[in-house]
Amino acid sequence: MSFAALRAHQARVIACESCPRLRRHCRAVAADPPRRHAGDVYWARPVPGFGDPGARIVLVGLAPGAHGSNRTGRMFTGDASGDFLYPALHRAGLASQPRATSRDDGLTLRGCWITAAARCAPPGNKPAPAELERCRAWLERELALLPDVRVLLAIGRIGHDAVLRIWGERLTRWPFAHGAVHRVPGRPALVDSYHVSRQNTNTGKLTAEMFDGVVARAVELAGPETTPPSRSPRASSGSSRAASRPRTT
Ligand code: SF4
C-alpha cells in the first residue's frame, strides 16, 4: 500500500472537472439547499474514496447523494443511505462507530474502503453512461492502489457493473443479484447487495438483516487479516480511533 499515492489520488479526484453536467449540478444543489440544510457549507466537489489503505473489503456504491456526501464530502455521510450503511459496518466491526454525520465526526474504517462508480452527485441519482465511463478510470486507479483487497462489495447494480467493466468482463456472464458471490478467475470475489438507498430500505426491499448477511459473507470471504492495522488517509476522516476487529471465520 502507498499512503502517499492514495492521498495524491484523492486530491486528483477532488479536483476533477471532467463531467460538466455533474459539476454544475453539484454546485447548483449547494447554492440552493433545502430548508433542513440551510446555512450548511456544501462540499460540492467530487467525493474521494476513503477508509483503511490495508482494506480487504472495498464497497463500491453508485454516486454521492445531493444532500449527503455532496454536502459533507465523505462517502455515504449525512443522509439516509449512510444511516443504514454505517450501523451495519459497525456491527460487523468494520467501522469505529455507527454514526456518520460529517468528515470530522471521528468515524474510521478498519479493513474496509468505501468508494463509488461516480464521484459527483448526478441529477436524479442517474449518471450518464459517458460520465460513468469517465469516472471508472478513477475507480480503476484507486483499486490498483489497494493491493490487499480480497472482496469487492457492490452496493447496487451500478457499482457491480463498474467493477465488471474494469475487469473487462461481460455483464451478462455475471448478472447482478442481491447476495450473489461472483468468482471471476484471478480477481477478488465480487459480492452483490441491493443499494442502501431509502427507496430500498423504506420499502423493505433491503432490510438490516439482509444487509448484515451480505456484509458477513464479505467478511468471511475476506479471510483473516494479513496486514497490520492502518490509519485512514487524513482527508478521509478526522480521528485515529480504530474500530474493533472485523469478524472473520
Ligand atoms: S463524476 Fe468522476 S469523472 Fe466526472 S467530474 Fe466527477 S470525479 Fe470527474
Image: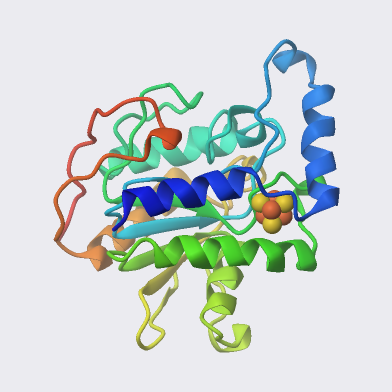
Q: Is residue 29 above or below residue 46?
A: above
Asked if residue 199 shows in the view, the reply is: yes
- Judge from the rendering whether residue 100 lies leftward or rightward of residue 157; answer left or right: left
Where on the picture, by quarter, is residue 220?
bottom left
Q: Residue at the location (62% across, 54% down)?
A: 62
- Judge from the rendering whether residue 177 lies leftward or rightward of residue 98; answer left or right: right
What is the x, y in percent for residue 176? 56, 73
Where on the picture, by quarter, is residue 165?
bottom right
Asked if residue 204 shows in the view, the reply is: no
What is the x, y in percent for residue 218? 32, 61
- Judge from the rendering whether residue 185 lies leftward or rightward of residue 230; answer left or right: right
What is the x, y in percent for residue 240? 26, 29
Q: How many marks do you count on the picture?
A: 0
Q: Residue at the location (35% across, 86% down)?
A: 186
What is the x, y in percent for residue 234? 38, 34
Q: Residue at the location (51% across, 58% down)?
A: 60
Q: Is residue 185 above or below residue 18?
A: below
Q: Is residue 162 above or below residue 156?
A: below
Q: Is residue 187 above or below residue 221?
A: below
Front residue (pair 2, 63)? 2
Quadrant of the drawing holding the C terminus: bottom left
Front residue (pair 59, 195)? 59
User: Which residue reaches farthest top?
Assistant: 39
